[in-house]
Amino acid sequence: MKTSQILIPTQKEAPNDAQIISHQLMIRAGLISKLASGLYSYLPMGLKVLKKVEKIIREEMNNAGAQELLMPVAQPAELWQKSGRWEQYGAELLRFSDRHGRDFCLGPTHEEVITNLAEQYLSSYKQLPVNFYQIQTKFRDEIRPRFGVMRSREFIMKDAYSFHIDAESMQLEFEKMHSTYCKIFTRLGLDYRPVLADSGSIGGENSIEFHVLAESGEDEICFSDESEYAANIEKVAFSEQVAKISTGVSEKEVLTKKKTSIEEVAEFLNVEKSDCIKTLIIKIKDGFKALALRGDHELCEIKVQNLYGEFSFASEDEIKSLGLKKGFIGVKDLNIDLIVDYFAAAEVDFVCGANEWDKHLTGVNWAGIKFVCSDLRNAVNGDDSPDGKGKLIIKRGIEVGHIFQLGDKYSKAMNANVIGESGKAKTMMMGCYGIGVTRIIAAAIEQNYDDKGIIFSASIAPFQVVIVPINYNKSTRVKDLADDLYQQFLDAGIEVLLNDKKARAGIMFAESELWGIPHRLVLSDTHADNGNIEYKARNEEQKVQIPFSTALDYIQKQLVQ
Ligand code: ATP
Ligand code: MG
């Protein structure tokens, strides 16, 4: 293709809302264009990258024996009512009604639709196991769409759903998908890690996320420095410690005027944050709960959600209505249930609020206080690894894939049964397997760029080679040579872009770097005088002069490397 035949609206500056590098570069290189918050168009070059990512995923899913199908984006409410998720799924589910007043939603995921298909068409254990997948648009009305296509509202997912006669077969397919995902992410050129994960609203027991390691990642991943243990921070489970129910004698009330945060209180009383206990009040479906954590620990919202379902933090008015004072809430004499994190329960002689304005208590102990213990906090660097081997190190990751063992959550709710070997009806077991197709492009760029632009791996680059002829529109010699070379590449089936713009050499060089095309050839009259052409790999600094006549051969050798 020639640049005159393809829309590549390269930009010098990134838009203000582009906070992370992949978003900035995708806009600047003319891969995507924003329509509205969380909605992006893929421009021709961006679409080429997207199609390459899809192709790799499709090939590996087909190799693994999965069958491709395509389901509608719009889904009737009845299916979601059957599974119970019409109510459960929060505001991310975009609901609407049609002209007849029937309720629908835009699919954020397709468990309901596929289970409905399975219920219709799978009737015997002989048809199992089976794995269906699609590569299709999803819609999630994300509360904060951001980072371009990394967290958009409309995005493309590869979602697969498998059906089984029993848990053993489900487990086997889960393992097969695990290795298929490893193949996919390796072919995509990503530095990734599979980690234990929480199953969220999708459900099921065991799930594994695949994370691309990058500083801009929204997730925190914990690794053991001694073992293979790796888990999303949400999933790091701490076991119960022995709460030291000690009866200290030194409890005292102290004035802590206007000191409401743990930092302020710890500094004022000259104690460590870990010696203070903070109490948070949450509102759940049927009332309020008090959660106590060590001052240096952070609440893990997913752990709370897994205990109590959807929750919110109590407002100032709600706290007041409970007779409590925001900033000075303690652990004694609360008239609501108190849940104490294991590590907070192991504290002795600690500081906490006095439940009175401008006052805290010091030397407090748990004896005589009514509470239950639970695992409430996020892991921190240096925590003991839950497998008992080594310490945890926390890194940031971008979730690009997630595989689940759903069990019978959907098949049971939606009556997806088959006749088993014994002739009796059996509820099918299910697995589901997602990959964020569009997010992968952003994640790949987060891992591979430099100050000049994107560095695409060969497997997903929009073009393999870019030819940059200097003075193409003035020098017929350069034009003829460049056109000849371009034709040679086309004939050899190599994806080549010829920059035939009337632009200054500097601009053309900068563009070719920005686009991240792996191989670049520069041709000028000087090169022509010497019978040479200049070659540069995008991921290397050095330029080499090669005889013009060997250019095709040279590039072909680079491509097979
Ligand atoms: P996240 O935790 O990032 O919100 P999720 O756990 O809700 O994602 P899944 O339901 O597991 O996502 O969806 C499968 C895959 O779809 C994810 O691994 C991710 O790569 C991709 N994905 C999810 N939400 C978005 C989004 N808003 N924009 C782009 N890709 C997304
Ligand atoms: Mg997920």
Image: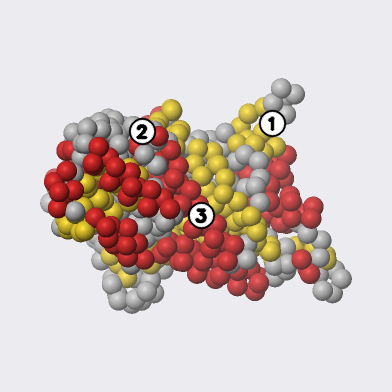
For residue 97, side relative to residue 269 (left or right): right
Residue at mark 2 to residue at mark 1: CA–CA distance: 47 Å
Q: Earlier in the sequence, mark 2 or mark 3?
A: 2
Give the answer, above or below, for where 212 lies relative to 150.
Answer: below
Q: Which mark is residue 555?
A: none
Which residue corresponds to the image point at 41% horizontal and 64% vertical from the top-left?
Answer: 186
Q: Nearer the viewer, residue 227 or 466?
A: 466
For residue 140, side relative to residue 348 (left or right): right
Coordinates of residue 258 in the picture (x, y in percent):
20, 35
Give the answer, above or below, for where 18 lies relative to 253.
Answer: above
Q: Earlier in the sequence, mark 1 or mark 3?
A: 3
What amino acid is found at the position of numbered circle 1 in the picture? Asp
Q: Give the class, few, some or many, for how many residues have Cα within 10 Å of label 1's Cα (few <14, many ≥20).
A: some
Q: Nearer the viewer, residue 535 or 472?
A: 472
Q: Give the class, few, some or many, for how many residues have Cα within 10 Å of label 3's Cα (few <14, many ≥20).
A: some
The extreme right residue here reads 423
Quickly name the residue at label 3: 55
Q: Earlier in the sequence, mark 2 or mark 1?
A: 2
Quickly name the residue at label 1: 103
Q: Nearer the viewer, residue 64 or 298?
A: 64
